[in-house]
């Protein structure tokens, strides 16, 4: 008998790689990339995840993670919170002792995400074309172990992000990451801008792209 549809997720890809972003950068990580996204950011580097992927049973994903021998798991997309079964996946992974990261685009309500999941939340900038997608109440569901990421396309995005961080004193809520959008803003330029303001904000580079370029599945 086929399990109910709530036991399946549409998956773009799964793979093991070096975690390239955030506070766990450099660690081996098992990635689960869900397919489908409700946003269309100007700099998106995973457009292949827009399209529906194969429907995979949750237990198969959990078995694949166990077989990887890697404790760190990142659930990403696309936008993973578009699929309701992802909440069960997060609970099951936590129950089995995984350290779970959730990368989400900031447009979806985080209230049902398990507390122990480390939330990496994009705050979309004007340069992304999606700045209006932000769900403001999400700030109440974040804690000091979570991360708010600003992907910046240039100096105007940088000024806007600095204003947002200062206005809301976001460093009191979560870890703040500034990342240069690939092919839009040079990492050195962003580093120099950050040194000028000297805010408690962390520069984030995409380590996986430094190592392997734009190849998929890494």
Image: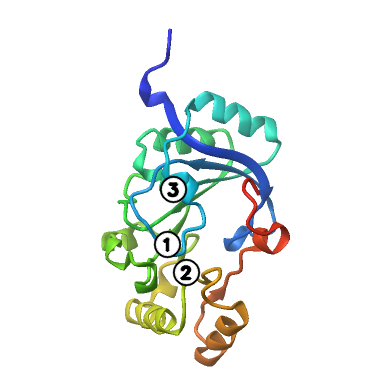
Where does the image place residue 41, in percent across and percent down from the top left?
Answer: 40, 61
Dot 1 or dot 3: first in sequence order is 3
Question: Mark 3 = which residue?
Answer: 78
Q: Is residue 117 visible?
A: no
Disc 2 element: strand
Question: Mark 2 = which residue?
Answer: 151
Question: Mark 1 = which residue?
Answer: 122
Q: Does residue 91 appear left or right of residue 5 in this picture?
A: right
- Residue at horizontal 60 percent and vertical 26 percent from the top: 63
Q: Are marks 1 and 2 in contact (CB under 8 Å)?
A: yes
Front residue (pair 209, 100): 209
Mark 2 crowdedness (10 Å alpha carbons): few <14, some 14-19, many ≥20: many
Residue furthest to the bottom: 196
- Residue at horizontal 39 percent and vertical 33 percent from the top: 85
Where does the image place residue 21, in percent across and percent down from the top left?
Answer: 59, 61
In three-dimensional space, the C-alpha distance between marks 2 and 3, rounded to whole angstroms, equals: 16 Å
Front residue (pair 10, 137): 10
Q: Does residue 36 appear left or right of residue 19 in this picture?
A: left
> Is label 1 or label 3 in front?
3
Disc 1 element: strand
Where does the image place residue 27, in percent across and percent down from the top left?
Answer: 69, 54
In three-dimensional space, the C-alpha distance between marks 1 and 3, rounded to whole angstroms, equals: 12 Å
């Amino acid at each position: 008998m086929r399990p109910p549809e709530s036991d399946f997720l549409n998956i773009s890809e799964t793979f093991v790689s070096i975690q390239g972003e955030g506070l766990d950068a450099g660690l081996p990580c098992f990635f689960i990339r869900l397919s489908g996204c409700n946003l269309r950011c100007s700099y998106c580097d995973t457009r292949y995840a827009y399209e529906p992927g194969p429907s995979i049973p949750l237990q198969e994903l959990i078995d694949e993670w166990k077989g990887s021998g890697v404790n760190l798991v990142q659930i990403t997309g696309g936008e993973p919170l578009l699929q309701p079964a992802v909440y069960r996946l997060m609970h099951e992974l936590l129950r089995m002792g995984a350290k779970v990261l959730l990368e989400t685009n900031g447009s979806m309500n985080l209230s049902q995400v398990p507390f122990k999941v480390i939330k990496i939340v994009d705050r979309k900038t004007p340069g992304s074309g999606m700045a209006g997608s932000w769900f403001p109440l999400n700030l109440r569901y974040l804690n000091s172990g979570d991360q708010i990421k600003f992907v910046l396309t240039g100096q105007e995005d940088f000024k806007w992000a600095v204003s947002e961080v200062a206005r809301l004193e976001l460093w009191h809520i979560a870890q703040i990451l500034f990342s240069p959008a690939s092919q839009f803003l040079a990492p050195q330029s962003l580093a120099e801008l950050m040194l000028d303001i000297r805010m408690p904000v962390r520069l984030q580079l995409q380590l996986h792209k430094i190592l392997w370029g734009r190849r998929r599945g890494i």
